[in-house]
Amino acid sequence: MDDFYWIGLKAVPGIGNVAFRRLLERFDTPEAALNASPAALSGIRGIAPAVIEGIKSGEWRRFAEKECRRLEVSGACLVTYISHDYPKSLFEIPDPPAFLYVKGKLYSCELSIAIVGSRRATSYGVMTTGKLAGALAGHGVCIVSGMARGVDTAAHKGALQAGGRSIGVLGCGIDKIYPPENRALFGEMAGKGCLVSEFPLGTLPLAENFPRRNRIISGLSSGVLVVEAAEKSGSLITAQYALEQGRDVFAVPGNISIATSRGSNRLIKQGAKLVDQPQDILDELNLQNRSPSGTTDSRVKKPESQTTQPLSDEETQVLQAVSSYPVHGDDLVRKLSLSSGKLMAIMLHLEIKGLVKRTPGNYFSLTAP
């Protein structure tokens, strides 16, 4: 039933990721936000009268009901802000998706590198991509890309063939296979890695979806490697997102006489780290002594930054009840006399601020200093 309200709130015209987050911070749950009074809603920054009318009209219910039925038969699940396996790295981007449609296994903390490039990759580009992706995956690095033709496909295949993990971020609904020739790869990714999308089921792979998709590719990753990109390509958009998000940008040098090398070569001129072997990336990630491994579970905890943001009285109360030893959410509910929804909302804020961490099974503990 929770999925119904998460989908429903996002379906209200005018509620994007930022507005959704503000509503969740104020009302704790999407259900409470959808049932809030117009007066309470009008006090939220960015919630216009038209949005309030959209909530009160109840039109969102029909879409949410239909989407929940589709979700049930799609084989996918919804991973929301407050899910223990929602990637914490996405909280570092300006507008993290309120939820993701997921097929496969998604981890909250995973060392990942995005590899992106031309859909019309040369044989050199495909070979180089597969070699780099496989080598990085062999060192326990998850490979993130966009499931497109060319470099993306080579990156996913290289990681999986090396026995590693790979995440495919889609610019369409997770029930749409695009490009169609990647049907077998889609099945393999769902079984051995993960497919994710922020777009509703049934969404077609329209051109305007891919720039939004690219911010998630970089947001899931510690850095972005560009292999063969033209001067005006989506790969450069991903690299730009990476810079804005504080991620590292890497590039493979290409043949100066080929158009699909001009974008990646320009990135190197502008300061991207030149990569001609996997060790260049491993060194940058401080993994010089990391031994190769064929494991398919490459979860690696990244250091969580401590916050200097002020805490509310409720956040302080909850933080004082958490220790370095994991405590179950139900125990905190009883100890603090809070509703489960209220506790989850407060924990979300504390996780974003880097003060607590959530582990599978709904356990919470303080992050290491």
Image (tube, rainbow, N blue to C red):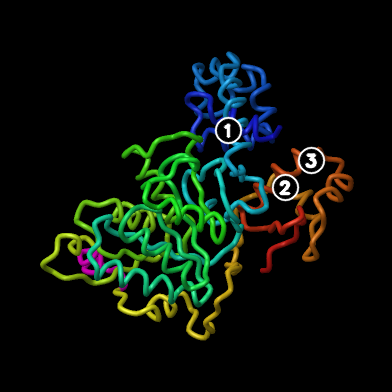
Residue occupying the point 40% across, 75% down: 281
The residue under label 2 is 315
Q: Quadrant of the C terminus?
A: bottom right
- Look at discs 2 and 1 and give the one toward the viewer: 1
Numbered label attached to residue 36 = none
Q: What count of labels does the image hold?
A: 3
Q: Position of residue 130 (x, y in %)?
A: 37, 70
Q: Position of residue 3 (x, y in %)?
A: 65, 35
- Toward the viewer: 348 or 79? 79
**Mark 1 burial class by Cα count in 10 Å: few <14, some 14-19, many 20+:** some
Q: Quadrant of residue 116?
A: bottom left
Q: Position of residue 77 (x, y in %)?
A: 61, 43
Quick check: is 269 in the magenta stretch? yes
Residue occupying the point 45% across, 56% down: 185
The residue under label 3 is 340
Q: Which residues are magenta?
A: 264-273
Q: Earlier in the sequence, mark 2 or mark 1?
A: 1
283 over 271 or under it: above or below: below
